[in-house]
Image: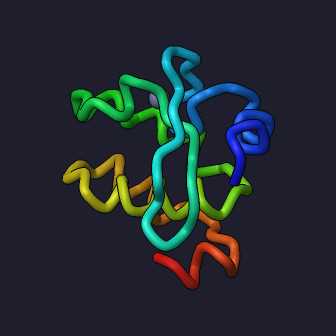
Amino acid sequence: MTWGTLMSRAHGMCEFCGGMDDCLPVEVEGAGEILVCAICDSDPPVEHWRCLESAARSEVPEVQVAVWRKLGEIEAPWAEKIRSGMALSPEAQALV
Ligand SMILES: [Zn+2]
């Protein structure tokens, strides 16, 4: 995927938290690329990942896969709750 395609899909915003600072493409293993901001890419405090509640509603399979995996790494009841409420697309389901 080109930078331009990724930027326009993500509207120039982090596909995890919607932040606009220093967004860069990040490889989602086996799925493709997503646009992620410097904060999300820097191992932020667990509470930052509450942003995934809205990211979980993304219709982009790559984002769904990335959110699903990230939530699986977080040991908190709210993370499990967001994860169990996700409606994964068939493409994403094949990858998680
Ligand atoms: Zn972010």
Q: Does residue 48 sit above or below 26 in this rendering?
A: above
Q: Does residue 39 sit above or below 2 in this rendering?
A: above
Front one among 9 and 78: 9
Front one among 34 and 74: 34
Across the whole image, how many numbered discs are drawn on residues? 0
The single residue placed furthest to the top in the displayed view is 21
Left or right of 7, for residue 54:
left
The single residue placed furthest to the front in the displayed view is 2
Q: Position of residue 22 (x, y in %)?
A: 49, 19
Q: Quadrant of residue 15?
A: top right
Q: Does residue 93 sit above or below 6 in this rendering?
A: below
Quarter the N terminus occupies? bottom right
Q: Position of residue 80 (x, y in %)?
A: 35, 58
Q: Position of residue 81 (x, y in %)?
A: 41, 56
What residue sits 19% from the left and 53% below the top? 75
Q: Position of residue 4 (x, y in %)?
A: 76, 37
What residue sits 28% from the left and 51% below the top? 77
Q: Does residue 80 sit above or below 12 in this rendering?
A: below
Left or right of 80, for residue 57:
right
What residue sits 68% from the left and 39% below the top? 3
Name the image colouring.
rainbow
